[in-house]
Amino acid sequence: MNVTEVLSTHFEGVAPLNHPIMVLALRGWFDVADVATTAVSELLTDRIAPVVAVIDPDPFFDFTQERPQVELDEDDVRHVRWPANEFRIARFPGAPHDVIALSGVEPHLRYATFADSVIAVAKASNCELVVTLGAVADTIPHTRPPIVVGSTTVRSLIGELGLSPPRYQGITGLVGVLQERLDRAGVAGVSLRVSVPHYLGNAEHPQSSIALLQHLHHVVGVPVRTARLAAEAARRRVLHDEAVAGDEQASAYVAMLEREYDQRSEAAIPSADDLGADFERFLRDQDEGED
């Protein structure tokens, strides 16, 4: 099976994009509490975002795990909704970059073909960078700002953006496979991941989604809207505070996490403003190298 058999693209008639960047998140192992996919979906909220490419779900999913859903429309006609991986374009007039966004579902099978399909869309749309967003459970308190860290396999980006090369070894998901294949294909890629308080289980944590969006904005200059998420985050904070306050052991544990958090360095990557300036410098250097 190859990319042409599973990928449908619809770029015909699409006006050129302004220095496009791909932003993607996949619900699954690397998306605790759907934090990352929520961030990408929020990026597209209330925007005209036509679909320009679709990955056929049939070869990639075990439908006993990711079951399709039957729905009735307003005329009571039945439709089956399959796991969707659709790439949408969003234009941001006045911003340095337009976006091709994917808020999808991590496949169960054929990681290599799926990753190559993502890369094919990035190349077809002349994306200058592919940014993967993820969320991981961590020992951080819900009373402090979520920590966002970034990594890349591109040496020039490591220096320009102050990121770190990936150090993780072990089992991985689609994002790990994609980052390796982006490097092999010569497509610049960055992974941004946010920490989510592990003791909340799989409860929604909008504050972590906001943190991802804010870092995305500062690094690549894409405008983001967080007002709706901020309102939900405030509501969730009250619920989480009440749950912790009602349990003496939980309260003591959160207090310990707060002390540890406060002792850590303020950030694992440089300031957001510095990152944005460094990224634009990296793109200019790339353009000059091509000339």
Image (cartoon, rainbow, N blue to C red):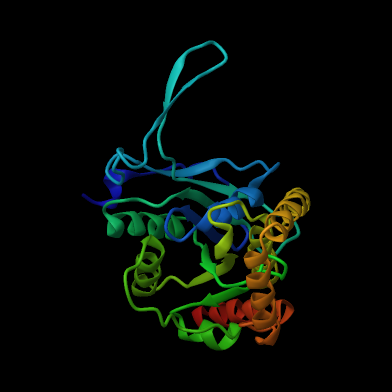
Q: Nearer the viewer, residue 141 or 174?
A: 141
Q: Residue, x 40% and y 60% (percent of image)?
A: 119
Relative vertical location of residue 220 with respect to residue 38 in this rendering, above or below: below
On the image, the x and y values in percent for residue 175 come to 41, 64
Q: How many marks?
A: 0
Q: Nearer the viewer, residue 113 or 150?
A: 150
Would you say 13 lies left or right of 216 here? left
Would you say 85 lies left or right of 247 here? left
Q: Is residue 166 visible?
A: yes
Q: Nearer the viewer, residue 291 or 238?
A: 238
Relative vertical location of residue 153 with respect to residue 205 in this rendering, above or below: below
Relative vertical location of residue 130 with respect to residue 61 in this rendering, above or below: below
Q: Residue, x 43% and y 21% (percent of image)?
A: 79
On the image, the x and y values in percent for residue 223 come to 72, 59
Relative vertical location of residue 250 with respect to residue 152 in this rendering, above or below: above
Q: Nearer the viewer, residue 193 or 58?
A: 193
Q: Residue furthest front?
A: 248
On the image, the x and y values in percent for residue 115 come to 35, 59
On the image, the x and y values in percent for residue 232 come to 73, 49
Q: Is residue 129 visible?
A: no
Tell me the quarter of the picture where residue 195 sits.
bottom right
Would you say 80 lies left or right of 51 here? left
Tell me the quarter of the picture where residue 171 sits.
bottom left
Q: Residue, x 38% and y 74% (percent of image)?
A: 183
Q: Residue furthest top?
A: 75
